[in-house]
Image (cartoon, rainbow, N blue to C red):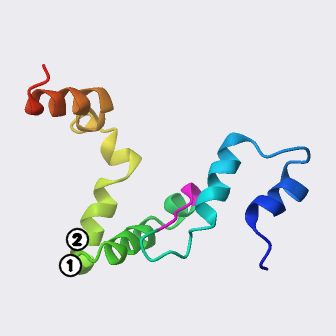
Amino acid sequence: SNIPLSSFALLRVVPGGVDRALHNLCDWWEHRNDPNICVFFFDDLKERHLESVNRVQRFLELGGGEELALAVAAQSTHEFMSSPDNHSKFDDHKIVAEIDRLRGYE
C-alpha cells in the first residue's frame, strides 16, 4: 500500500502517538528505496544471515564472491565474536581506545 509508515503506526500500531524508535524508523522508511540506503531488520539478519551478508556485499559493490561472503558470515556470528580467542576484538571500549591511540589522543 502507499500509506506512509508513520501514518500506519500512528493509526494502527501505537494509538495516541509514535515513540521515538518508531519515529526514527518512520524517517528511514521513507528512504528505504533510495539507491544509497540499504535497510536491514535484526530478525532478517539472524534468520537469513548469509543472504544478508550477500546483500551488503552487493550493495557495497564488493568483489570476492561466495568465498568472501562465507568468511564474513562465519566471522560475524555471536558464537565467533564471543569466543575466548575473539571476544576482546569486538569490545567497543577497546576499539575506541585503540583508535584514540592511533590518532594520538591518549
| Residue type at numbered disc 1 | Gly
Query: In the rendered image, which residue does mark 2 sit on?
Result: 68
In which image quadrant can residue 100 be found?
A: top left
Mark 1 or 2 closer to N-term?
A: 1
- 28 vs 90, left or right, is right
From the viewer's side, name the closer residue of 41 and 4: 4
The label number, if any, that marks residue 103 in the structure image: none
Number of callouts: 2
- Write the residue at 52% across / 63% down: 40
Label 1 to label 2: alpha-carbon separation:
8 Å
User: On screen, 25 above or below 18?
Assistant: below
Estimate how packed mark 1 is, as few (under 14), some (14 to 19) or many (20 or more) residues with alpha carbons within 10 Å: few
Query: In the rendered image, which residue does mark 1 sit on?
Result: 63
- Write the residue at 82% across / 61% down: 7
- 105 vs 77, left or right, is left
User: On screen, 32 above or below 77?
Assistant: below
- 20 vs 81, left or right, is right
| Residue type at numbered disc 2 | Leu
Estimate how packed mark 2 is, as few (under 14), some (14 to 19) or many (20 or more) residues with alpha carbons within 10 Å: some
Is 39 one of the magenta-colored residues?
A: yes
